[in-house]
Amino acid sequence: MSNFKFHYPITVRYGDLDPQWHVNNARFLVFLEQTRLAYVQNLGLFDGKDFFNLGMIVADVHIAYRAPIQLNEPVRVGMRVTRLGGKSFQTEYLIENQQTGEVKATAEIVMVTFDYHQNRSIPIPDHWREKIAAFEGIPPGPAST
């Protein structure tokens, strides 16, 4: 997890389990969503008050399931932004057992910056680009026009 500067702990709840008593595969996506929300709040890009001002929407998801997650297992999600485009950015995730480091899943998600009031994609705001690039140590990508 050394390549990830942001980590978010997950509490596995009874409602996350399926009849086989491990976390349902659909819940992994919720874990990624929780992590993404915490990431943008941590960087000061979203205040958590009005979801119409969240400013992003999921465009593409790929999850590779590696191992089941059990009830009460200590889990954390690492997240990073690896590329900033004009209106989209690439994110990567690693879900792992906090104690053993066992990888439970990896994921890649493309996010599109989005204006929910106008119902359309928008260029990545310059302040987002600057904060993410500085935090991740990546090129800022194309400037907004």
Image: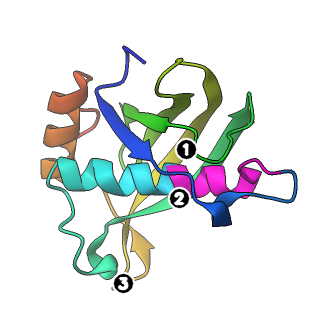
Q: Nearer the viewer, mark 3 or mark 1?
A: 1
> How many neighbours does mark 3 have within 10 angstroms: few (below 14), some (14-19), or many (20 or more)?
few
Q: Nearer the viewer, residue 1 or 52?
A: 1
The extreme right residue here reads 20
What type is the residue that disc 2 sits on?
Answer: Val
What type is the residue that disc 3 sits on?
Answer: Gln
CB contact under 8 Å: marks 1 and 2: yes
The overriding secondary structure of the stretch rendered in magenta is: helix
Q: Nearer the viewer, residue 12 or 103?
A: 12
- Secondary-structure class at tag 3: loop
What type is the residue that disc 1 sits on?
Answer: Ile
- Secondary-structure class at tag 2: strand
> How many neighbours does mark 2 have within 10 angstroms: few (below 14), some (14-19), or many (20 or more)?
few
Residue drawn at point x = 41 percent, y = 49 percent? 35
The residue identified by callout 2 is: 58
Q: Nearer the viewer, residue 78 or 132?
A: 78
Q: Position of residue 97 (x, y in %)?
A: 54, 28
The residue identified by callout 1 is: 109
The residue identified by callout 3 is: 118
Question: Residue 99, relative to residue 131: is it above or below?
Answer: above
- Secondary-structure class at tag 1: strand
